[in-house]
């Protein structure tokens, strides 16, 4: 994991505890930042630095090289991901891209002159979804939505829910892994994974061809809720996540349970919804 | 006396065979060139098919292997991110420049630009392939004949 980083940055990361590294912010000609143990810190050549003066300053070439290496040295193989603003590297590391978008006929053609990368490092935390499983799934399958601001461990929880369903039940689980993050870890023996596919296509082809009892997906946005509604109405339980602030923001008539996370993997509220 | 005659014939045969083998080996460079460009052309065709369909990463395509000789070394060095090791003894300066450009562009753009570039390269690679095949045939036949003649000359001198 993180082998795609340029040598200078890779060396800096080696000086810190990888289990506490959740995110790297690589910005051209700006101080290197790491989400280390839950808070952002400057990262220097010898590890955590007390100030920006001691931090490494990645060059534009290093940003470009990191992105090219993360794509497996093969841009065409990930061009669809790049158009959507991210690349998923080996090990499920998701890299968000900031650069100049190039359009053709109203559609994104490519992203050039990339100046920033947001590297999110997945961590498997076995048992982190026990509370949610006991509250929402242990006695019956209930469509459940995990909500929180970004970076609170929703994907980690979803991954663990897949694992628990695989260990404790014989339900067929379909993982619609649009960004290749959920299936980066153990997702259970009964899981079928559709990767890098939009949710509408994944849901419709998956339901028709793979006969799932449960669909697990992450980061619902906009039209995704319509696909989830159709799936739930067709009798499939959906476990999903979304960037929402409160259970009252959850669209009505889809989910039976809403779980609000507060901090990395911390469940603040687990609420049964009506309808 | 009959034994001596057979012995002489045997020696003559061995000498001719040895000189023919030398002639064959002398043409090895041209056969190696032909094999290099055959494999490069075939790789380009596979790559264009890959771009049109499953678009696997180029490293996966190259690891499928089946390459041999100096071309296998070129591919291995490319996969190891050490730049394509292009054999100077086999290729001319212009050929080396084209092959170097080829590998430097591999995987560097989106599917559309890669398809455009490598489709355009097809013509160059087809020309190299045809030229090297013709040269390998011509030189191979020439050196084989020279080998046989040299062998016969040696037999006459010896015997």
Image (spheres, rainbow, N blue to C red):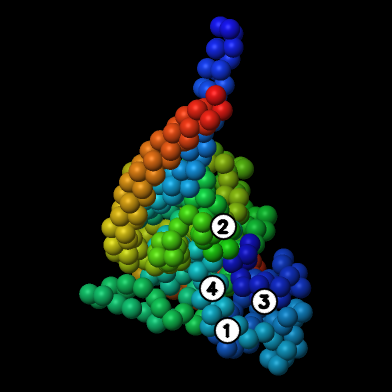
Which chain hosts label 2? B
Q: Earlier in the sequence, mark 3 or mark 1?
A: 3
Q: Which label is found at residue A8?
A: 3
A91 or B92: nearer the eye? B92
Residue that numbered label 1 is attached to: A59
Which chain hosts label 1? A
A136 or B3: nearer the eye? B3
For numbered disc 4, what is the local secondary structure?
A: helix
Name of the residue lying farthest toward the bottom: A53
Dot 2, how many residues are within 10 Å of its Cα: few (below 14), some (14-19), or many (20+)? some
Q: CA distance from mark 3 to mark 1?
A: 11 Å
Residue that numbered label 4 is attached to: A65
Q: State yes or no: discs 2 and 4 in contact (Cβ < 8 Å).
A: no
For numbered disc 2, what is the local secondary structure?
A: helix
Q: Is residue A48 visible?
A: yes
In front of the other: label 2 or label 1? 2
Q: State yes or no: discs 1 and 4 in contact (Cβ < 8 Å).
A: no
| Image quadrant where one finds the N terminus of chain A | bottom right
Q: Which label is found at residue B133?
A: none
Q: CA distance from mark 2 to mark 4?
A: 19 Å
In percent of width and height, residue A183 lies at: 54, 54
**Tags 2 and 4 on a common chain:** no
Residue that numbered label 2 is attached to: B77
- Taking the spot 59% from the left edge, 67% from the top edge, the residue there is A4
| Image quadrant where one finds the C terminus of chain A | bottom left
- Taking the spot 68% from the left edge, 55% from the top edge, the residue there is A126
In percent of width and height, residue A256 lies at: 46, 58
Q: State yes or no: discs 2 and 3 in contact (Cβ < 8 Å).
A: no
Q: CA distance from mark 2 to mark 3?
A: 23 Å
- Taking the spot 75% from the left edge, 88% from the top edge, the residue there is A50
For numbered disc 3, what is the local secondary structure?
A: helix
């Amino acid at each position: 994991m993180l082998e795609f980083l340029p040598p200078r940055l890779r060396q800096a990361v080696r000086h810190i505890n990888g289990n506490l590294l959740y995110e790297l912010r690589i910005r051209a000609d700006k101080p290197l930042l790491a989400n280390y143990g839950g808070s952002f810190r400057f990262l220097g050549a010898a590890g955590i630095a007390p100030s920006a003066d001691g931090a490494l300053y990645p060059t534009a070439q290093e940003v470009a090289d990191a992105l090219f290496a993360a794509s497996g040295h093969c841009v065409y193989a990930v061009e669809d991901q790049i158009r959507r603003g991210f690349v998923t590297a080996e090990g499920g590391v998701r890299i968000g891209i900031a650069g100049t978008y190039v359009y053709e006929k109203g559609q994104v053609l490519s992203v050039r002159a990339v100046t920033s990368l947001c590297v999110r490092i997945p961590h498997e935390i076995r048992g982190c979804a026990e509370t949610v499983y006991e509250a929402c799934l242990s006695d019956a399958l209930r469509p459940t939505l995990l909500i929180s601001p970004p970076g609170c461990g929703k994907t980690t929880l979803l991954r663990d829910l897949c694992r628990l369903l695989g260990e404790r039940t014989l339900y067929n689980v379909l993982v619609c892994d649009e960004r290749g993050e959920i299936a980066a870890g153990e997702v259970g023996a009964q899981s079928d994974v559709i990767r890098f596919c939009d949710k509408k296509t994944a849901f419709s082809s998956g339901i028709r061809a793979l006969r799932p009892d449960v669909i697990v997906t992450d980061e619902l946005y906009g039209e995704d809720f319509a696909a989830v509604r159709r799936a739930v109405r067709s009798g499939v339980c959906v476990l999903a996540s979304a960037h929402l602030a409160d259970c009252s923001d959850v669209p009505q008539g889809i989910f039976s349970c809403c779980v609000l996370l507060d901090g990395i993997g911390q469940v603040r509220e687990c609420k049964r919804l009506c309808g | 006396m009959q034994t001596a005659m057979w012995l002489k014939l045997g020696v003559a045969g061995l000498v001719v065979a040895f000189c023919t083998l030398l002639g064959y080996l002398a043409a090895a460079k041209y056969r190696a060139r032909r094999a290099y460009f055959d494999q490069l052309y075939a790789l380009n065709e596979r790559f264009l098919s890959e771009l049109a369909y499953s678009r696997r990463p180029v490293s996966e395509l190259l690891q499928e292997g089946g390459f041999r000789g100096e071309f296998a070394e070129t591919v291995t060095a490319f996969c190891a991110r050490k730049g394509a090791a292009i054999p100077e003894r086999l290729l001319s300066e212009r050929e080396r420049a084209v092959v170097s450009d080829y590998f430097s562009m591999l995987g560097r753009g989106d599917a559309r630009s890669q398809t455009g570039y490598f489709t355009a390269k097809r013509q160059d690679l087809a020309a190299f392939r045809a030229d090297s095949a013709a040269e390998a045939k011509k030189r191979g036949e020439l050196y084989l004949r020279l080998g046989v003649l040299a062998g016969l000359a040696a037999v006459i001198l010896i015997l």
